[in-house]
Image: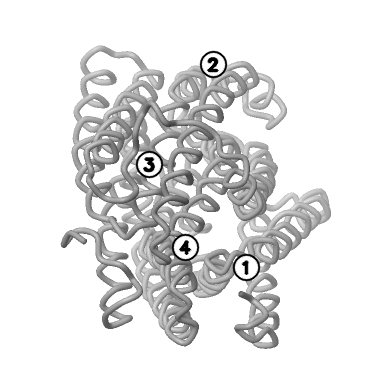
Amino acid sequence: MTKTIQPMTEGAIWKRMTFFALPILLGNLFQQMYNTVDSLIVGNFLGSSALAAVSSSGSLIFMLIGFLSGIATGAGVIVARLFGAGDKETLHRAVHTTVAFGLAAGILMTGIGVLLTPNILRWMDTPSSVMPEAVSYLQIYFAGSLAFVLYNIFVGILQAVGDSRHPLYYLIASSVINLVLDILFISGFHTGVGGAALATVISQVVSAGLCLLQLVRTKESYRLILSKIRFDRKILGQIIRIGLPSGVQNSIIAFANVIVQSDINAFGEMAMAGYGAYTKIEGFGFLPITSFTLAITTFVGQNLGARQKERTEKGARFGILVTVILAEIIGIIVFLFAPQMIAAFDSTPQVVQFGIEKARTAALFYVLLAASHSIAAVLRGAGKAIVPMFVMMICWCIIRVAFLSITIPLTHSIQMVYWVYPITWALSTATFLVYYKKANWAEIR
């Protein structure tokens, strides 16, 4: 075993989880920079209308990518368990089946994304003033779907076996490329928002290529042999059984957020730009929590594969505690410095005001969001992805959409959109806590 790949079945729990999560945090930071750099440069060079066009695309992008990322999560759980159990032969088949799925899904997503973008944006009530730029941005973005999907698949495999460092190195390189190309395309070649999307696609191709090279060149048991990429029926069934609930959950939540975005769109370009700027800040702020939830899932998967139940339970408790503490600290920071953060994207007073109102409604409730995500991560690592799917589908989709369908026509207030998130976070957290408290470890395994 190399120094880079350290199994989470050995050593101090806090140290294994923390040092696994830190490279993921830095990697996610650079990943988040992709779209954030786009928004910063677009907002400052092209104005509020262009920023609104880019911002309105986020929920739609996540709706399609989120489904495939959920499947990749299922694959990661399978890989982590097999790696923890030392089953090299089955691990080999799992890695190649996962990559085969990524290839097929990436091609399918390219066609769906490019063809349906105009219709979906119209359905979202995207203002006509930003429609051409929004369509251009999204179609170019989805044209590079294969690279996005494969990157997530490759990173999922590497992280499942405990390698969180190489994805970080590759993201740093591709993020620098993205920044340089953004400035070159937008301010140099004057390509508009399409140039921002193209820069992101090129950067993602680089990071996916580097991850592929790492998997092909490694001497470890998870080595990828291109000529052996094919579906294994049994492994694919296991991946879908665990990953499908997560994929459905991600897509349903994103679908609900698309509906929320349509409610935001109804309040005009300034609201779209302000809300979009806040979502970029929230995305950065929540990266430490996302990193630890990935560590939780990998830790639980590997240790259950190694049949270390007591260690699994201790690691789960540590991960949940860390995520909720981090979330509240980050929430306080966002609450206090929201004006400066929003203004960095767009200093238009009306845009800043919309962003501040959203930030100061939601930020102090990040602890609830963290609790939901961390408990869900434990359950996914244990192979019980159905519970998070139903809890989040009901709380974050059905109740969220129903709430807005009733309150927006009655109040005509954007505050209802702001408050629907903390309310539904509280509901999901309460449900998860009841389930987690009543279910003993024998049951959730």
Q: Which residue is mark 2?
A: 132
Label disc, if present, on residue 81 of the rendered structure? 4
Measured in 3D between alpha carbons, the distance from the residue under mark 2 to the one under mark 1, in whole angstroms, is 34 Å
Q: Which residue is mark 1?
A: 425
Which amino acid type corresponds to the residue marked 3 in the rendered image? Answer: Phe
Q: Residue 72: horizontal and vertical position, in percent?
A: 51, 46
Measured in 3D between alpha carbons, the distance from the residue under mark 3 to the one under mark 1, in whole angstroms, is 31 Å
Query: Residue 173: which quarter of the image?
Result: top left
Label disc, if present, on residue 154 of the rendered structure? 3
Which amino acid type corresponds to the residue marked 4 in the rendered image? Answer: Arg
Give the residue drawn at x 64%, y 26%: 121
Which amino acid type corresponds to the residue marked 1 in the rendered image? Answer: Trp
- Give the mark nearer the N terminus: 2 vs 1: 2
Q: In the rendered view of the protein, which quadrant contains the N terminus?
A: bottom left
- Give the mark nearer the N terminus: 1 vs 4: 4
- Give the mark nearer the N terminus: 4 vs 2: 4
Give the residue drawn at x 62%, y 26%: 127
Q: Residue 88: horizontal and vertical position, in percent?
A: 39, 54
> Which dot, 4 or 3, sits closer to the camera?
4
Query: Residue 242: which quarter of the image?
Result: bottom right
Confirm or deny contact between disc 4 and disc 2 (CB under 8 A): no
- Up the image or down, 315 lies above or below 289; here it is below
Q: Secondary structure at mark 1?
A: helix
Q: Residue 211: horizontal and vertical position, in percent?
A: 29, 38
Confirm or deny contact between disc 2 and disc 3 (CB under 8 A): no
Q: Secondary structure at mark 3?
A: helix
Confirm or deny contact between disc 4 and disc 3 (CB under 8 A): no
- Give the mark nearer the N terminus: 3 vs 1: 3
Question: Quick one: label 1, few (<14), some, or many (20+) residues within 10 Å?
Answer: many
